[in-house]
Amino acid sequence: MGLEDYWGVGPKTSERLRDRLGEERAVEAIESADVRALTDAGITRGRATRILRRANADAGMDALATRDTREVYDDLLELAGNYALTGHAGDRIRVLTPLTSRESIESRLDAVEAARDAWTGLDDEGRATVVAAFDAYDAADGTERAAVDAALALREAGLDGATFDTLGEIDPDAIWAAATALGDVTADGVAEGADDRLDDLRARLDDARDLEDSAFDVLDDVRGAGVRDLSDFRHAFADYVASETHLSRSAVEEAAPEDAHDAADFASTTLRALVDDLERRVTERAGEVEADLRASIADARDDVDRAVAAVDDVAFDLSLARFAADHDLIRPVVGGDGLAVEGACNPFLADPDPVNYAVGDHDCSPPAGDRVAVLTGANSGGKTTLLETCCAVALLAAMGLPVPADRAEVGFFDSIVFHRRHASFNAGVLESTLKSIVPPLTDGGRTLMLVDEFEAITEPGRAADLLNGLVELTVDRGALGVYVTHLADDLSPLPESARIDGIFAEGLTAELDLRVDYQPRFGTVGKSTPEFIVSRLVANADDRGERSGFERLAAAVGEEAVQATLADAWE
């Protein structure tokens, strides 16, 4: 597969990747979701992410049918990415996409569930060891030596092949030997400490170079020892150099020229010859040692490669496991013809209220069999939050990830249509909204519709007509849907497989916040209860004229109800 066969890789992008990475390495980076490699090659992070999301899951990305669906998808991956143990794991999380088969969904759920059990099974010390191992791996920029060290640390922390196959395939003894060899062979050659003989030769070479650089000082020191002629100088010089370099006196004499013109010529020529000889000996010894080290690495090459793969795979799985554990996510039942949750919580809220809700066929506690639910009720009652929760559950399940609920059954959807309330009342917004949400219903795939308040973009009477049409179209096309509206009383009789649910406000708290029962009541029209809002305005009004105005509104919505609300709040 060539570079330009990948979505988003045009002639300019492919040319840049070839120049910076080469064709083979660029293809490998795309296939392995290596965002860092693409950004290092000059591709922006956003574009790199889009390319990688489309690289192997074109049909999966098509499930994100609207801008609001894509925003929830992005937010979910950002949330999960916060738990990444390495930079590469974070990149892999950010390019997760909805999967296109039940088998692949179940496979990823298996992996995350097993990793979660492994993570939660570690004690605090074990978890700290794992985190430190990945931190060190990242700090070393993912080198082979860092990968081997991390793999060994993960095994020592208690992670093994029972959960992570790639860790189980590693021979610990082989990579122990490889770890030493990998640490001793660097980009600059053989590292210090790898071989005593090489270290000794390097030390002598450094001393000889120092003497060569300070040859005039050497002359002064030797002459100061009371030498009388060149013969005395030769002997004194050999003794001096031997003591400073730890070379034998005979080795220094062997390097000395026979025909030096004077003491200065003798000293500089001798020192140059010593440096040249030591450089040759260092190079030869370094070559011998490096050859032995690389042979050790070659013997363990398969295990080293397994360690590199294992560390990346385990970091990815454990990152998702940490996300699942921290948010109390559970494995959904995947398949069937419905979306049903018990105790579902919005993953983006700090302290969400759990709710039970469902459409379609399922075995959970909410009513089953209804293809469409029309959700009604109080302003600020959590209707949009419930839609967002349903969208998040559907998307997480589609990506093979656990979901925020006590129990969940999630069907397989070709399109997930989430449309938030957009407060713009004009024909252009209405047209763009309909063009966004209707085509997925008519494309022939399985669709989940989650649509919020049509009355915000057109007049109420027309909105009710459109909503009736959408409900009927959803049922006719075999789709599932939840539609939020305040116009339940204006709707025509709904199809038999549709129901109306309601969320109810129950009063004000002592702090005059709206008190809402966020659990929808099935088969019941919810009420907006404006008297609660007016009650709060009356209670908070400081200006006498302002208060008088709100009291007039209280009389309009029911003064007794307003007074009763305030009395209950201040009991």
Image (cartoon, rainbow, N blue to C red):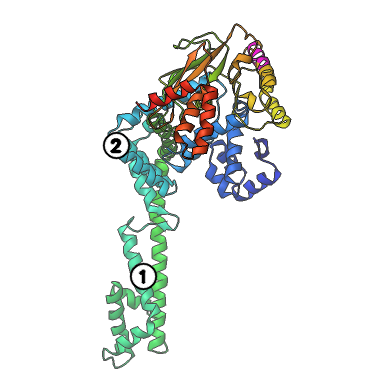
Residue placed under numbered mark 2 in the picture: 126
Q: Is residue 366 left or right of residue 448?
A: left
For mark 1, give the secondary structure: helix
Q: Residue furthest bottom?
A: 228
Q: Residues within 10 Å of mark 1 (few under 14, many from 20)?
A: some
In this rendered view, identify the residue nearer to me: 450 or 202. 450
Residue 24 vertical position relative to residue 108 in the rendered view, above or below: below
Across and down, in percent, residue 27 comes to 59, 39
Q: Name the image quarter holding the C terminus.
A: top left
Main secondary structure along the magenta-highlighted residues: helix
Q: Which residue is at 37% across, 57% downward? A: 191
Q: Which residue is mark 1?
A: 206
Location of residue 79 in the rendering, given as x and y in whole percent from the top left corner: 47, 35
Q: Quadrant of the N terminus?
A: top right
Q: Amino acid at mark 2?
A: Gly
Residue nearest the viewer, comparing 461 with 183: 461
**C-alpha separation, residue under disc 2 versus residue under disc 1:** 45 Å
**Of the residues under marks 2 and 1, which one precedes in the sequence?**
2
| Residue range highlighted in magenta | 468-475
| Camera-nearest residue between 377 and 107 | 377
424 part of magenta stretch = no
Which residue type carries mark 1? Asp
* Residue 177 screen position, x and y as percent: 34, 44
Q: Report the residue at 36% width, 45% height from top.
A: 179
